[in-house]
Image: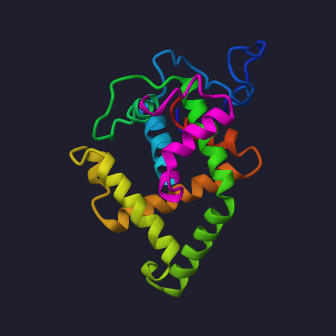
Amino acid sequence: MNGPVTLMQSKSPPDKTIPDLLQSLPDPPGHWEIGCPRSTRLQIDLILLAIEALYLGGSEAILAVAKEQQLDHIIKNRVFLWQLRSSNPLRRYSQRRPLSLLEAKALVAIACSLARRLTVTIRQLLLDYHQLQVKQIPIEQHLRLSNYLERFRAHFRSRMNPRRAGVMAYNSNEKLDELAISLLGQLLLCTGTAGMQRLWTSLFDGEV
């Protein structure tokens, strides 16, 4: 099925084993016992990669937010976080493990929380980027934007498997910069009204 996906709320009572924060993220229609689809796992990891490029000490921030939001029983520790993110098939050390819907919801909730803390920075970087494009000014002349893009490229190249076709598609600084900017747009989506729900829904577009 192509096109946007509408995630329907279940009519059954809320599952009390799921944290209240995640109750607002409905399961997509279909059977997901084997975990999230490939594109969802990939996109969640890239979103977190962009946050790490913005946030010095990104992994520590992710774990701190997990504890603040009482999601640390899902995102247990640094090693477990690495295992979840390594379910991204493009990772250099990709793990052949599923990413459950509950784990994916927790990662989305954490990503959105961190994005909201960076709202002003994200909005300003996007605005400055578009102004540089219009004026045809090299990005290198904008220190903060240039630093973000440089860190994102470094993170991507160090963590993704260069032999994967999906990684080979980003074989230049320009293509990686385009990806990094598009991820800023997704992060900005997270900061708006119902941003977490909209991001969650977008992760399953075309999957059901």
Residue reaching furthest to the left? 163
Determine if the magenta segment contains residue 54.
yes
**Is 42 displayed left or right of 201 in the figure?**
left
The image position of residue 119, as x and y in percent, is 68, 59
Quadrant of the drawing holding the C terminus: top right
**Is 186 displayed left or right of 15 in the figure?**
left
On the question of residue 51 being in view, the answer is yes
**Is 75 displayed left or right of 88 in the figure?**
right
Determine the residue positioned at 76% across, 12% down.
12
Dividing the picture into quadrants, the one containing residue 203 is top right
How many badges with numbers are in the image? 0
The image position of residue 184, as x and y in percent, is 55, 58
Decide: is 36 above or below 91.
Answer: above
The image position of residue 44, as x and y in percent, is 50, 40
Check the image and tell me how it is coloured. Answer: rainbow
The image position of residue 81, as x and y in percent, is 46, 33
The magenta segment is 51-79
Determine the residue positioned at 47% across, 86% down.
137
Determine the residue positioned at 78% across, 13% down.
13
Decide: is 17 above or below 119.
Answer: above
Determine the residue positioned at 59% across, 68% down.
126
**Is 141 displayed left or right of 11 in the figure?**
left
Q: Nearer the viewer, residue 156 or 197?
A: 156
Determine if the magenta segment contains residue 200.
no
Q: Nearer the viewer, residue 134 or 92?
A: 92
On the question of residue 4 being in view, the answer is no
